[in-house]
Amino acid sequence: NKFSWKPSLFKRQLDALKQCHIEELRIWPNPFAQNFTEYQFLTVAELNSINYLDGYNIDSELRDELRLQSDKFQARVDYTVFDIKVEERARSRMPIEQSKDELPAGEVPTLPELTSTLQLCLDRPTELMKHIHTLEDQVRNVWAARFWERQRISERKDPGHREGPARRMKPDEESQAASEFGDAMQQALGRFDTVQDVLVMCLVRLLACGSTPLSQRAAQILAEWIDAASPEIQSRMLDMSNALFQDLASRTLAGSYSVSEAPFACYEASQGNEKWLRDCIGDGEIAEPEQVAEAAGILTALCKFGPSEPWNNSMPPFRALVLRPFLPVICRESRKTLGPNLPSDGWAAYRHFDAFPQDSVMTLDIQADDVNLARERCVRQGFGGFTACEEQPGKFKIRFKAHAPDALAGSRVSSEGTTLHVRPRATLKSKGRSVKPQDVKYQAWQTWEGGLHVLRMATNDPNNAALCVREHNLHVALMVHDQHEQGWRDAWMLNTAAATRAFVVSMQVALNLVHAAGSAGLQAARYFVEQKLHCNCWVRVRRRLAEGSTAMTVEQLSEAPVEITTLISIVISVVCALCRVSDEELARTVAEDIQAAGLDLFDRLVDVAATPGIPDPLIFATACELIHAFMIMP
């Protein structure tokens, strides 16, 4: 009794059993039933002839009750969702030290080898499960290897030289190989519904493969799969997002620099000057180059979920929704606040810190000297750690966390009076030499900017935006960068295109926060107005419209580079959004501040809208938006 079906395959077996007259069926206990307890209800609902299931008598009263529930429930059953949920349950119940992903990795496959395995799935559908398991093992080897070792995925052996050493593919060869893999993966996703969960998880893990063309192609296919998913799957997309991306988000913790870090310091570090970054972090921990490169690759690949045009701030809703697991990573506190990480080979106790405060799986009351009891319970239950908070003198409330130890340690947040206890965790062991590639820069800026882009996409969902305001204080971090000397300085932005692009994205995030669901949008808007964000935006646009000592003409403005027009457009959109808030007193404050700053900029944009032969369409739309906002001002 060791068979283990996926729920979607179990549905097929039930359809087959309907043709028989089955009166007694015994399934429990086995690996399949352990993580899919819903099978009992579904079996009784599907098989009308069954009288005994797992030794329990199914009488007529119970059968009638289950049938009534089945009529309501059956229309909403989607077994592909159960496939993902069962895998998630299995991982959460597995003791951490026995996780497959922490076992020593096998040899990292090359990209042509991955494509070859996928092609076998397509050419030999009668052997589908055999080749799918091979693909799953190959991707697991990539996932479990050290990041520098994953560079082997970009190697190949030339025809006629199979016995010689492999060589690194040229950029065009690697792009072509990634395209071939993507084509095969799309065919497999379209043809084989029963293994979609395995294929999708392979795509998720390949976002961390170390090959830029492959990771970005995987992200693109994943985004298209999310768009094309059935309505039943899309309605459960938020639950699926944790199963899909929780492990990947944890992978970015060690090497990413959160949005709370100073952007100028991260940029200087990527240019070879780490002094700025070390001064900002203080006693905090500088991430290792290998960890930073891994995080940069993941976050850069995720940028494929959103639009490529810098002025476009819209995206399909479900793509934004599934990025929620990355919010605690990108919005976590600065490394200076977190301080140094404690050794991972023993229990780590972080005083005055919590992690995932709203997410506890079990609580326990203990005495002050019973912390070892809590640790034993944590290990026995397979949890990643727990928090201890003294609620009464000598009595502590223990809240156990199901997250992985690395996720708990990396996502900790300041919490006075709370101690976060994190389990010992295994370190990834290399099977061979982990050699750093040549000419690899420290990619602190790439991780910071990539995280900002992911925030822009994720906060397109109003509920994600509200979460960023209420739980992560993202609006506060954005204003720090707008005002701090290591934030958005005009001299830096005028001389660095990357800084201008990042500033535009940060303003798009601010705009999304103003449109957050519930009262969170008004909370963000009120803070922005208190900190005079609208005044800063007004002054920035005025400076950009000046060319030397004279103002730019309408003709010059219509011919301005796209970076300039995009910056003017998004900054004016932020001002307009603050003018249109539902709080009339707040909107009146914005109007008064803008008038006090001078309406010369408004007059310039009126001239743009009134000029015959419409100028740059983006600037024209911005001018119309500002005129409308001024017309409805209190």
Image (cartoon, grey):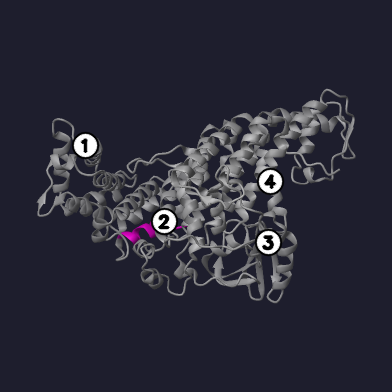
- The reply to whether dot 3 and dot 1 touch (C-beta < 8 Å) is no
- The reply to whether dot 1 and dot 4 touch (C-beta < 8 Å) is no
Q: Residue 446 carries which label?
A: 2
Residue for point 38% across, 53% down = 524
**What span is colored magenta in the figure?**
472-482
Front one among 356 and 541:
541
Q: Which mark is residue 616?
A: 1
Front one among 430 and 380:
430
- Amino acid type at circle 2 is Gln
x then y, percent, for residue 275: 37, 72
Q: Mark 4 points at which residue?
A: 87
Q: Residues within 10 Å of mark 4 (few under 14, many from 20)?
A: some
- Toward which corner of the image does residue 20 lie, by quadrant? top right
- Toward which corner of the image does residue 60 lie, by quadrant? top right
x then y, percent, for residue 124: 68, 31
Q: Mark 3 points at which residue?
A: 363
- Amino acid type at circle 4 is Glu
- Amino acid type at circle 3 is Thr
- In this rendering, position of residue 247 left or right of residue 585: right
Residue 106 in the image: above or below residue 126: below
Residue for point 23% across, 49% down = 591
- Amino acid type at circle 1 is Asp
Q: How far apart in space, not on screen, are marks 2 and 3 (Cα)? A: 40 Å
Element class at badge 1 = loop
* Tag nearer the camera, 4 or 2: 2
Residue 230 in the image: above or below residue 251: above
